[in-house]
Amino acid sequence: MIDTHCHFDMMPKPEAYIREKEQIGDIVIGMTNLPSHFRLGIPFVKAFKHIRLALGLHPLLAADNIIETNLFREYIDQTSYIGEIGLDFSKASVGNKDLQISVFRDVLATLKGKRKIVSVHSRKAEKELFALLCEYDIKNVVFHWYSGPTDLISEILSKGYYFSINESMTLSMHGRSIIDMIPRNRILTESDAPYNEKSDIKKTMASIQITEAEVFRNFSELLSRIR
Ligand SMILES: [Zn+2]
C-alpha cells in the first residue's frame, strides 16, 4: 500500500511504526510540519528503503515560524518530497492570512524549478493556493484531503496535479462528490495519521474500488516525472 501523506513523526513511536511498514513493504511518505522537524527526523529515516521524509512548513505554524524559511532553503536538496505546505483560511487561522501567504511565497520561490513531489494543504484557500502554484509554475503537486469547491477540480487536473484520498473523504457526501470527479489515474491514497481519525487505506481503496496495483501505477507515473 502507498501512504502519500502521513505524519509518523507525530506518533508516540515513529520508529516502530515505520519499521513495521517497511517490513510489510508499504511505501510511506512522512510529512513534517516544520523544517526543524525534518532536520531532527532525516537521520533516522535515511536507513529505510520504502519510507521517505518530506520537508514541510505547515500553514498553521507558518506565521509563528517565519524564521524557518531559512531552514527550508537549507534542506531543500536533501529530499525529493515536500510537505506539508500550503494555506489554511479556516476560521481559526484566517487572521494571519497575509503572513501565511508571504511564508508560502517564500517556500514556492525556493521550490521553483526543482524536481520535487509536493503535498499541499488547501483548506478554505483552494483558489488562492492554486493561483500561487500556477504563478510559480510548481509541478508534481498532490492535493491532500481536498475539500474545496468542485468547480476548481478540472483546472487542478489540467495542470497534471494529483489528489490523495483518505477514508474520511470516502465517508462524507462532499468528499464523495469530489472523488467522483477525479479520473482514476490521478488518485493516490493517504492516511494523514495520526491527525485523521478515519485513516484506513485498505478501506479507502475498497470504498472507491481502486486496486493497490492502480495506485502503485499512479504513484510510479508521478515518480517518473522527477527522475
Ligand atoms: Zn497532514
Image (cartoon, rainbow, N blue to C red):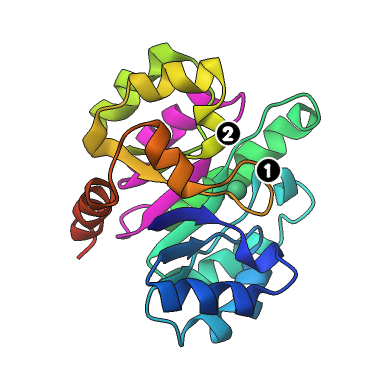
The label on residue 164 is none
Q: Is residue 130 magenta?
A: yes
Quarter of the picture containing the N terminus is bottom left
| Residue linked to disc 2 | 168
Task: Inspect the image, locate mark 2, and give the three-letter code of the amino acid beneath it.
Answer: Ser
> Cβ–Cβ below 8 Å for labels 2 and 1?
yes
Is residue 164 in view from this perspective? Answer: no
Q: Position of residue 209 (x, y in %)?
A: 32, 34
- Crowd rating for badge 1 (residues with CA inside 10 Å; few <14, some 14–19, many 20+): few
Task: Identify which residue is drawn at 39% across, 57% down.
Answer: 2
Mark 1 residue type: Glu
> How far apart in space, not on screen, are marks 2 and 1 (Cα)?
8 Å
In the image, the segment drawn in magenta is 112-141
Does residue 137 belong to the magenta stretch? yes
Q: Is residue 216 left or right of residue 153?
A: left
Which class describes the residues within 10 Å of circle 2: few (<14), some (14-19), or many (20+)? some
Find disc 1 in the rendering and name its residue.
Answer: 197
Residues 192 and 138: in front is 192
The answer to which quarter of the image holds residue 225 is: bottom left
